[in-house]
Amino acid sequence: MTDIQRVLVAGIGNIFLGDDGFGVEVVNRINASALPPSVDVTDYGIRGVHLAYELLNGRYNSLIMVDAVPIEGPPGSLIVLEVDPTEDDPDTLGPVPVNGHGMHPQAVLNLLRDLGGGVERVLIVGCKPAVIDEGMGLSAPVAAALDDAVRLVADLARHEAETLATSAIRQNARQEIQRGVQEGSRLESQQGTRQEAQREARRRSPRGIEQEARQATRQETQQDTKQASVRRPVDVESADA
C-alpha cells in the first residue's frame, strides 16, 4: 500500500527585519489541530538548510511556503504562486539575495535540487512587504493581511491534503487490481500444474500401469490384425502344382 502522502506548510523569514517576518507570523497563527493529520505546519524562520534537509527524505509530496515576496500591488497584497521545483525562476520569486534574512524560497529549492532531492508540488503564499529593515514587528498593511493569509494558507493545505489522499486511494486501487490479476494468474498456473501432477500420479499407480499395459496389448493386437489383413493371399493352384 502507498505510504501516506503529506503536506508541509513552512513559514519562513526573519522576524528582526520588519515585514520579512510575515511567513513566521502566519504559521504561528494557524490552528494546526484543525487541519488534516497529513499536514504539518512549521516555523523555519531563517533555517533554509534545515527545510531543504527536511524535504530531502521524500516524506512530503506537497510544500506550501509562506513568505514576504516582492510582487506587484500595494503592501499587504496577497498572492499564491505555483513554482516548478526543478527550475530556477528568479522572475517569479525575485533574485536570491546574497545577504538578507538568509532564507529565500528559491534558495531552498536550489539547495534541495543540488542535494539530489525534490518535491512534487510547490506553492508560495506571498505578501507584498512595506518595510524590510531592521526592527521587529510588521507594518500596518501587512499586519492587516494576516487573518486573510491564515485562512488562505489553511484552505490551501486542506485542498492539497485532500488531493493527495484521493491520488493515493486511486494508486492503491490500481495496485490492488494488479495484485489480483497476478494472484489469479498464479493460482491458474498452480491449478494447471496440480492437474498435471494428478494425471501423472494416476498414470504411475498400479491400476494406471495395468491400464497402460492393456492399452499397449490392444494396440499390438490391432496392429497384427491390420498387417494380416493386408498380407498377400496364397495361390491355391500354384500350391497344388
Image: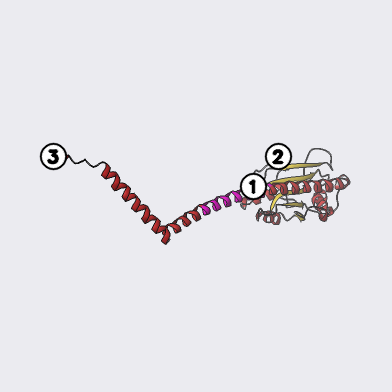
Q: 102 or 142: nearer the eye?
A: 142
Q: Which residue is mark 3?
A: 238
Tag shown at residue 91:
2
**Which of marks 2 and 1 precedes in the sequence?**
2
Which SS does the magenta portion mostly show? helix
Is 58 positioned to the left or the right of 159 in the image?
A: left
The quadrant in which residue 204 appears is bottom left
The quadrant in which residue 42 appears is bottom right
| Residue at 73% from the left image edge and 56% from the top image edge | 47
**Which of marks 2 and 3 precedes in the sequence?**
2
- What is the spatial separation of the Cα atoms under label 1 and label 2, in whole angstroms? 40 Å
| Residue at 45% from the left image edge and 59% from the top image edge | 201
Name the image quarter holding the C terminus. Answer: top left
Q: 157 or 25: nearer the eye?
A: 157
| Residue at 70% from the left image edge and 49% from the top image edge | 169
Packing grade of label 1 (10 A; few <14, some 14-19, many >=20) is few
Q: Is residue 47 above or below residue 235?
A: below
Task: Check disc 2 and report its element: helix, strand or loop.
Answer: helix
Q: Position of residue 229 (x, y in %)?
A: 27, 42
Does the segment drawn in magenta span residue 178? Answer: yes
Name the image quarter holding the N terminus. Answer: bottom right
* Residue 132 shows up from this direction: no
- What is the spatial separation of the Cα atoms under label 3 and label 2, in whole angstroms? 119 Å
Q: Position of residue 65 (x, y in %)?
A: 75, 49
Q: Which residues are magenta?
A: 170-191
Contact (Cβ within 8 Å) of mark 3 with mark 2:
no
Q: Amino acid at mark 2?
A: Asp
Query: Which residue occupies the extreme bottom position in the image?
Result: 206
Q: Is residue 69 above or below residue 187?
A: above
